[in-house]
Image (tube, rainbow, N blue to C red):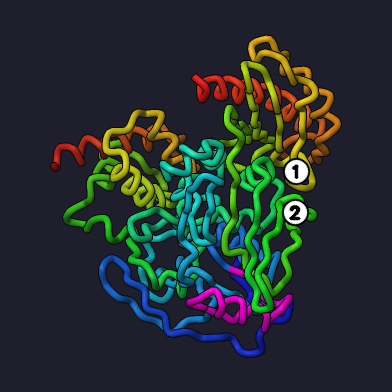
Amino acid sequence: MSEPMVEQLLDVTVTVNGRPRHARVPARRLLSDFLRHDVGLTGTHVGCEHGVCGACTVLVDGAPMRSCLMFAVTAQAYAVTTVEGLGSMDGLGPVQQAFLECHGLQCGFCTPGFLTTVTAFLCDNPDPTEGQAREAISGNLCRCTGYQNIVRSVLRAAELRAEAT
Amino acid sequence: MKPAPFVHHAPRTVDEATAVLADVGHDGKVLAGGQSLIPLLNMRLASPGHLVDVNGVCGLSDIRVDGSGVRVGALVRHAELERDPRAYAALPLLRQALAHVAHPVIRNRGTTVGSIAHADAAGEMPAVLALTGGLVEAAAANGDREVAVADFFLGALETSLRPEELVVAVRFPLFPPGTGTAFAERARRHGDYALAGVAAAVTIVDGVVARARLSFVSVTDVPGTLDVTEEFAGLEPEAAHWRDCSDRVRAHVAPETDLHATAEYRAMLATELAWRTLAEAASNALTVAA
């Protein structure tokens, strides 16, 4: 259980929202901290740091994963999409728009994790039932909404996506 | 809630990985999906000096299905195995159990081999490996070996792997013809660690039960199997009283009390799930035969 005397620093480049982002970081830098501290994208929220709450969920090659359970150095092999990559202030993505319309958030802390998770879910299942929508968000915790409006938001996002195509 | 410092190693081949492991010995830990390991690092329940990150190692990402079974490479994510149609056709128990492994987001990253090497008796896939009588393929600089599941799990989070060994794959052998399987577990919330879980395999030959076996999640110290063939052999599945296995299950399991449930409740739950999964496995066996 010996710790190395000198912290190992690595040059890490991760593709985030289509842009290569570089920083010299300790080997132990979590992807969540790399995104927030080194890249300055603070949309990814850090809740529990052990994979339970889902707030830090980002898309890794399009698949939702916990950024607190991956090291930045490992993430170099993939393209990462954060909540900032899902839309802009002027042009919200369909999932963001649906959460806005359906009051799918209150304090907003958990929201980035829901938005990324739901975005990937609707790519796999564009027309989910309410039950499937609930199952899809079962790995994300929200302490404000009671989930009812989040489930509505998922179903509304599916409609918005269908209308857009 | 941040890991202690470590030296990161990124081998590109199995030989490079095993060379590093041999070099760092007990101070090394293998990182694959990290969905169990990184929480332990973040909480500093583990602080290895060296992390051997095998995510870039070639040749560990294959699922191979043949007449003898399903071979799963060390970098196959739970979600890939869960979705693989050939693996499901050969061994439905894989998908039946994988659907209960944490949440879909965790399954996107976590590996089946990693959860077996992690050897948590609250994990689903160690129980599946036990029920299939599977094999673990371990590579090392001083020679590769295969370890039968019965010799692999030693205790809580403890296996017979040596520090210099890397698990490159696990093999799940097929069940005999006429076998149906089922898996069930209960957790406080879907996706949480199970309070108790059961995998069952029932083989029907000439319309009667020829073999019936169980393995358990969260209620035994080590993933192992319970053979209940004696209770049901020769019975037509519709006539079998599957609850007759209850005493055997009670004697087999040794759950512990924690915040989420008492030992007595977990034992009751395991017993209830055992007869239900046996009944479902028998029903699935008849469907397979039909």
Chain assignment, label 2? B
Direction bottom: furthest residue: A6
Residue B33 in the image: above or below residue A71: above
Q: Measuring 82% from the left and 30% from the top, which residue is drawn there?
A: B264
Direction top: furthest residue: B239
Occupied quadrant, residue A45: bottom left
Range of the magenta residues? B5-30
In 3D space, how far apart are the residues under numbered discs 1 and 2 (Cα atoms)? 8 Å
Q: Does the magenta stretch include residue B153?
A: no
- Dot 1: within a 10 Å radius of its alpha carbon, few (fewer than 14), some, or many (20 or more) residues? many
Q: Measuring 65% from the left and 49% from the top, which residue is drawn there?
A: B134
Residue B10 placed where, x, y %?
Answer: 51, 78
Residue B134 versus residue B185: which sits nearer the camera? B134
Determine whether, in the image, residue B43 is placed left or right of residue A41: right
Q: Name the residue under label 1.
A: B224
> Is there a contact, CB below 8 Å, between mark 1 and mark 2?
yes
Determine whether, in the image, residue B250 is placed left or right of residue B51: right
Quick check: can you spot residue A15? yes
Q: Point out which mark residue B153 bears.
A: 2
Q: Is residue B19 magenta?
A: yes
Residue B54 versus residue B190: which sits nearer the camera? B54
Determine whether, in the image, residue B198 is placed left or right of residue B71: right
- Amino acid bearing label 2: Phe
The answer to whether tags 1 and 2 share a subunit is: yes
Q: Measuring 75% from the left and 50% from the top, which residue is drawn there?
A: B150
